Image (cartoon, grey):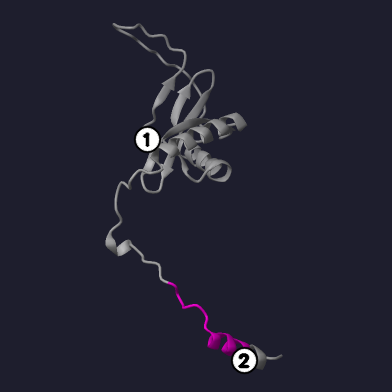
Amino acid sequence: MTTTILLDNVTLPETGPAEIQVRHSFTIGINAEQARRTVNRWLRTQVSMSLLADEPLLFIGDEVIWNVPILLTAGHLGAVGKVGSVHVNIQNGTLHVDRRIQQEITEKAVELAKRFADAPAVRDAPAEYIVTMQPTRNAPSQSDDIAHTHVMETASF
């Protein structure tokens, strides 16, 4: 499995040779896929069904966490864009979220959704998957009401 690693507080020269040495020991209690599933569960139950967790990034700073980007999706377009990210504790899977983070993600999602509301679909469905909705039965007629009443009257217990 390949994982992208982000490093915090690294000073680099503007140009020229650079060297980074990383030596950091930590225990992985939950893997990237588990972190992604945890965030997806939170999104579905607490935020919106239109949001999706993307590939987690390993973030090494004062603490080691999974940084999980959040994408807005639209049924007719697929993934539309990033609206935020959530941190997940790599050792125990605890989400680092609060009302402020949830509100920021929601606000960015609403703004992005407005820009794509009238966008045409990326792909058309094949003709065999297009369903024309037809009523399963006509509206009840007077005789249907009478027949139903008669059945109910004769079915006494």
Magenta run includes residue 10: no
**SS for callout 1:** loop
Q: Residue at x 52, y 38 (%)?
A: 39
Binning the other alpha carbons within 10 Å of mark 1 as few (below 14), some (14 to 19) or many (20 upward) gives: few
Of the pair 1 and 35, the residue shown nearer to us: 35
Q: Which label sits on residue 28?
A: none
Q: Quadrant of residue 18?
A: top left
* Residue 66 % position (x, y): 49, 30
Of the pair 132 and 15, the residue shown nearer to us: 132
Question: Please, what is the three-letter code of the amino acid marked with disc 2?
Answer: His
Q: Quadrant of the N terminus?
A: top left
Q: Residue at x 30, y 6 (%)?
A: 15
**SS for callout 2:** helix
Query: Going by the image, does 144 lie left or right of 13?
Result: right
Q: Quadrant of the C terminus?
A: bottom right
* Residue 133 % position (x, y): 40, 67
Magenta run includes residue 139: yes
* Residue 57 % position (x, y): 43, 29
Give the vertical position of 123 relative to 111 (above or below).
below
Which residue is under mark 2? 150
Query: Going by the image, does 54 lie left or right of 128?
Result: right
Q: Earlier in the sequence, mark 2 or mark 1?
A: 1
Which residue is under mark 1? 1
State whether residue 119 appears in this view: yes
Q: Where are the magenta residues, as a range?
A: 135-150
Question: Please, what is the three-letter code of the amino acid marked with disc 1?
Answer: Met
Query: Going by the image, does 88 lie left or right of 118?
Result: right
Of the pair 130 and 39, the residue shown nearer to us: 130
Q: Residue furthest bottom?
A: 154
State whether residue 29 appears in this view: no
* Residue 58 % position (x, y): 45, 27
